[in-house]
Amino acid sequence: MDRHEGSWSGPEQSIAADGNGWYRQGVALLRQGRPFEAIEALERALRLAPDDQDLLAHLAVARRAVGDVAGAAAIRRALLSWPRERNVSG
């Protein structure tokens, strides 16, 4: 299953040390219309996986959803300036 699929089942689900669990929770919360909670989960994931561009893109969407236009724009600018070799996912 792609990490973007499925839904978050809550705290009883194991959260991977690489941040994937927090990422999945953040995306699920964002899809549920809970952007403030999504930001918390995505920021936890970001501490564990700072080079994850999908994570950063979702964080930008969540920040925009709560009215943090400047924060969202800063993330998008950072993504646009990402070195080309880091744009390729492994």
Image (cartoon, rainbow, N blue to C red):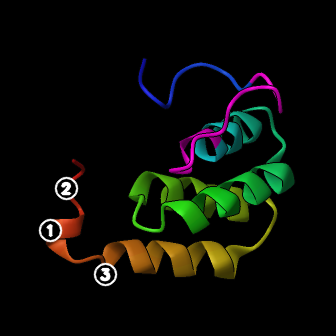
Q: Position of residue 17 (x, y in %)?
A: 56, 49
User: How far apart in space, not on screen, are marks 3 and 2 (Cα)?
Assistant: 14 Å
The magenta stretch is 9-21
Q: In this view, does 80 lie to the left or right of 41?
A: left
**Residue at position x 52%, y 22% in the image:** 5
Look at the picture and state if 60 lies above or below 79.
above
Depth check: 73 or 14 in front?
14
Q: Is mark 1 on a helix, strand or loop?
A: helix
Q: How far, Cα to Cα, is label 2 from label 1?
A: 6 Å
- Residue holding disc 3: 81
Mark 2 secondary-structure assignment: loop
Q: Dot 1, crowdedness within 10 Å: few (<14), some or many (≥20)? A: few
The residue pinned by badge 1 equals: 85
- Closer to us: 45 or 14: 14
- The residue depicted at 39 percent of the width and 72 percent of the height is 79
Q: Can residue 7 be found in the magenta stretch?
A: no
Q: Which amino acid does label 2 sit on?
A: Val
User: Residue 88: which numbered mark, if any?
Assistant: 2
- Does the segment drawn in magenta span residue 11? yes
Kind of element beneath mark 3: loop
Q: In which quarter of the image is residue 87?
A: bottom left
